Amino acid sequence: LGDAPRIGVEAACGFGWDRWTGETGAFIGMKSFGASAPIKELYEKFGITAEAVAKAAKSACGK
């Protein structure tokens, strides 16, 4: 995958993503046990949003 910044986005478990994102990459997704609610509420609760992805990408690129 080269040395470009990597961001993993997964609505489920983050287990194993470090293999793909590397030490300097970021993971956006659930880091704890799940919950039950409408999907939009869950994504916001767990920080799985476009804003979070954009922030992680900017940070990974040093911006």
Image (spheres, helix red, strand yellow):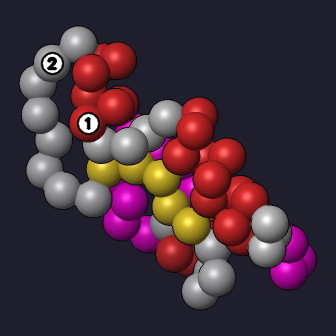
x then y, percent, for residue 1:
83, 71
Give the magenta part as a residue range: 1-16
**Badge number at residue 13:** none
**Badge number at residue 37:** 2
x then y, percent, for residue 3:
85, 80
x then y, percent, for residue 33:
13, 50
Camera-nearest residue between 51 and 33: 51
Per the image, label 2 sits on a secondary structure element best described as loop
Residue 47 lies left or right of residue 8; in this view the side is left
Q: Please identify the residue farthest to the top as the structure is shown.
A: 38
Does the image show residue 6? no
Residue 14 lies left or right of residue 42; in this view the side is right
Front of the two marks 2 and 1:
1
Q: Please identify the residue farthest to the bottom as the structure is shown.
A: 23
Q: Which residue is mark 1?
A: 45
**Would residue 56 be counted in the magenta stretch?**
no
Q: Give yes or no for contact between labels 2 and 1 (Cβ–Cβ under 8 Å).
A: yes
Q: Could you tell me how far apart the alpha carbons at marks 2 and 1 are, in whole angstroms?
A: 10 Å
